[in-house]
Amino acid sequence: MIRLSDVLLFYHNDKKFIVKNESEVKWSDSFSLTDSEVSDLICSYPADYSLHLLRQQRNQLLAATDWRMASDYPGANQTEWQTYRQALRDITTQTPSLDADGNLTGITWPTPPND
């Protein structure tokens, strides 16, 4: 279930607000959203958040393989690692979604080369 507070934090984490009964929002500054704007955010949230999670996981996998791109990498399979890393960068062309537990689904992750 999508919580209104999660949606507002995702899109407006720089704003201060209180959510009452998952339907009423009280903003603590001059910023506010109309009911229609909040509804639009709620509709956009699953796709936007799943892409955000996909990018986070992808970036972690890329960071874990950065060292393999150094010119003094000792492995003979650097080209395979380059191909794998490109596949990771291209993964955002897939359309991720979230399951009921908030986990990413609909993604085919590339397989890293063998060492």
Image (tube, rainbow, N blue to C red):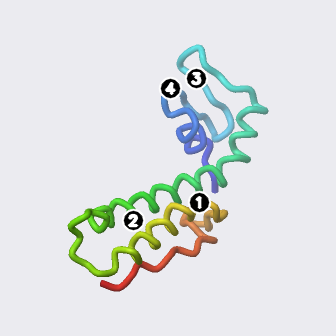
Q: Which residue is mark 4?
A: 16
Q: Which residue is mark 2?
A: 61
Q: Amino acid at mark 1?
A: Thr
Q: Which residue is mark 1?
A: 92
Vertical placement of 18 versus 88: above or below? above
Residue at x 55% of width, y 41% of height: 10
Q: Earlier in the sequence, mark 3 or mark 2?
A: 3
Residue at x 74% of width, y 26% of height: 34
Asked if the residue under mark 3 is in contact with the one under mark 4, i.e. CB atoms within 8 Å, the reply is: yes
Q: CA distance from mark 1 to mark 3?
A: 34 Å
Q: In the rendered view, does 6 fall on the left or right side of 94? A: left
Q: Position of residue 67 (x, y in %)?
A: 26, 64
Quarter assignment of residue 36: top right
Tell me the SS state at disc 3: strand
Q: In the rendered view, does 33 fall on the left or right side of 8? A: right
| Pick the front one: 44 or 115 | 115
What number of labels is visible?
4
Q: Earlier in the sequence, mark 1 or mark 3?
A: 3
| Pick the front one: 2 or 40 | 40
Asked if the residue under mark 2 is in contact with the one under mark 4, i.e. CB atoms within 8 Å, the reply is: no
Quadrant (top left/top right/bottom left/bottom right) for the N terminus: bottom right
Asked if the residue under mark 2 is in contact with the one under mark 3, i.e. CB atoms within 8 Å, the reply is: no
Q: Which residue is mark 3?
A: 27
